[in-house]
Image (tube, rainbow, N blue to C red):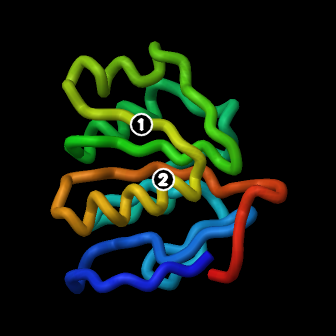
Amino acid sequence: MKFQLETAAGHYLFTGYGAGYVVVNGVRYEKSVAVTARRIIEDWQVESWEELSARHFEFLLGLAPEIVLLGTGARLRFPRPQLTLCLTQARIGFEAMDTAAACRTYNILCAEGRNVAAAVLPETGSGGAGNG
């Protein structure tokens, strides 16, 4: 699916997503990425859901967001609470959702001027949509 939305120059936004990829500002990524309004982290180094560890969330904490969105691929999955404990202790909001929903929610929050970080695992299987 492609997104069309007006935004301030210099902000990173999801402009599409599909089976096995996300698109940020017109650039396609087929691996997991972490995104904030001003930064894209291509080396978030999570190849799969099963690989997620506390250090991945500690890295996101270092981005100093007010909320973290985790896109879990084609289907919604919840990480074990001990993995996200650092976010809870720092009073950082956390939401897990499928990657498509995380992309859309991130764009909305970013457009509202919120300090949001999205870490997404590309969708796999038949859960994705459209062109990027």
Q: Residue 116 location, x and y as percent?
A: 28, 52
Say which quarter of the image contains residue 62. Answer: top left
Residue with the most extreme right position? 125
What mark, if any, has residue 109 been given in the picture?
none
Place of residue 118 in the rendered image (x, y in percent of width and height, measured from the top left): 41, 52
Inspect the image, locate mark 2, and give the three-letter code of the amino acid beneath it.
Answer: Ala
Q: Is residue 36 above or below residue 45?
A: below
Q: Amino acid at mark 1?
A: Glu
Which element carries disc 1, helix, strand or loop? Answer: strand
Q: Is residue 15 above or below residue 47?
A: below
Whichever of callouts 2 and 1 sits on the residue coming sooner in the sequence is 1
Identify the residue shown where x is 53% and y is 42%: 97
User: In whole angstroms, how far apart are the C-alphas of marks 2 and 1?
Assistant: 9 Å
Q: Which residue is mark 1?
A: 95
**Please, what secondary structure does the residue beneath circle 2 have?**
helix
Circle 2 residue: 102
Expressed as whole percent of the image width and height from the top left, the position of residue 29 reads: 60, 69
Residue drawn 60% across and 50% down?
121
* Residue contact at pointers 2 and 1, CB within 8 angstroms: yes
Q: Quadrant of the N terminus?
A: bottom right
